[in-house]
Amino acid sequence: TLSARILTVQMMQNPQILAALQERLDGLNGSPSGYMESLPKVVKRRVNALKNLQVKCAHIEAKFYEEVHELERKYAALYQPLFDKRSEIVKAAYEPTDEECEWKADEEEELTVSKQDEMKEKAKLEEEKKDEEKEDPKGIPEFWLTVFKNVDLLSDMLQEHDEPILKHLQDIKVKFSDPGQPMSFTLEFLFEANDFFTNTVLTKTYKMRSEPDESDPFSFDGPEIMCCTGCTIEWTKGKNVTLKTIKKKQKHKGRGTVRTVTKTVPNDSFFNFFTPPDVPENAELDEDSEAVLAADFEIGHFIRERIVPRAVLYFTGEAIEDDDDDVILSGSVLCVQEGEEEADEENDPDYDPKVRSHAPPSIHPPL
């Protein structure tokens, strides 16, 4: 049905659901049944021919994603004037007209005419009172800081000492690689002049690859982020929140005297996002570095795919409610499907748990 197809699309656009599904699918990979071993040699030979066709399909799929990237670049240019106007409103460079500010509420949110008039009068009195006390706030104060605090994935990175700095964040932009260049995208964080660093733009670039791995072509599932590079933050003296000073007492082994030494050590901060671990090409990573990079890639992808295009909805919280609804709905569907599978197995007299066939869906994460 149409509703089922819509729900499926929503599921496929949700990173958490995709991760859960992919985990289940990963558990199915690499476990060939004894059936393949029992096939006659001549049939195995033909299966190898099918595998070669599958490799060719993977290469065509890679070209498909390259064209999708080109399409994204094309439409990014169409979105950008709207994002630029959003930025101008946020930082008070442009005051929207009355017509631009009109917004029709949902039917259940609409109030009676009398109630609206009453609220307008009350708001007018409060506005006049505020005018007497102080000037109106400019633009939309703390817009991006509020967005970050509303999103769990980003708020987990925030420390209290980061917040005064992020109040100066005026915009986040996504820049795609030029035509003919290797596939990549750059996140640009634009700051107004502040007391913390002299940079006006902080950048994070993610390099991607859209081609099957020769050693494992069947694992290809769309573009993957290969590495990322940050930038150098020119901190004002004494304002670097990514470092902290600690004092330690040291005891001299010979004389037994105690002295206090001052040491500078790394400090938790959102701004560590701009100094990711250095990954030499083709180098093996330890588990900690892999975990850090995996989280970094997820955050970069989320900012590009969700935060930048829908910032106002994360500011108001509406996008967060939609994300939660997707998780609940999709989770319910998964539970129902699992329940149906178990029921089918119990009611099937021919069911043998040792011989169970799986037909996993083809899942492609959003670019």
Image (cartoon, rainbow, N blue to C red):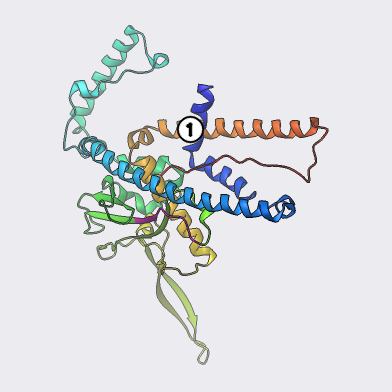
Q: Residue furthest right?
A: 349
Residue 265 sits in quarter: bottom left
Q: Quadrant of the N terminus?
A: top right
Is 143 placed left or right of 84 in the picture?
right
Query: Mark 1 = which residue?
Result: 10
Residue closest to the eye, 125 or 183: 183
Up-down relation of residue 248 to residue 114 (above or below) = below
**Magenta part of the chain:** 206-214
Locate residue 339, reporting x and y percent: 70, 32
The answer to whether residue 210 is magenta is yes
User: Of 12 and 303, which appears nearest the observer?
Assistant: 12
User: Where 81 falls versus 259 (above or below)?
Assistant: above
**Looking at the picture, which amino acid does disc 1 mark?**
Gln
Q: Residue furthest front?
A: 42
**Residue 277, x across and y down, in percent:** 41, 65
- Left/right placement of residue 228 relative to residue 233 reads right
Identify the residue at image location x=52%, y=67%. Answer: 286
Residue 62 among those drawn in magenta = no
Secondary structure of the residue carrying tag 1 is: helix
Place of residue 335 in the rendered image (x, y in percent of width and height, measured from the top left): 65, 33
The crowding category of the residue bearing disc 1, from other C-alpha atoms within 10 Å (few below 14, some 14 to 19, many at least 20), is some
- Classify 87 as above or below 187: above
Q: What residue do we see at 40% from left, 74% from top?
A: 263
Q: Tell me if I can see residue 279 in this picture.
A: yes
The residue drawn where x is 58% and y is 42% is 21
| Quadrant the C terminus occupies | top left
Q: Nearer the viewer, residue 335 or 42?
A: 42
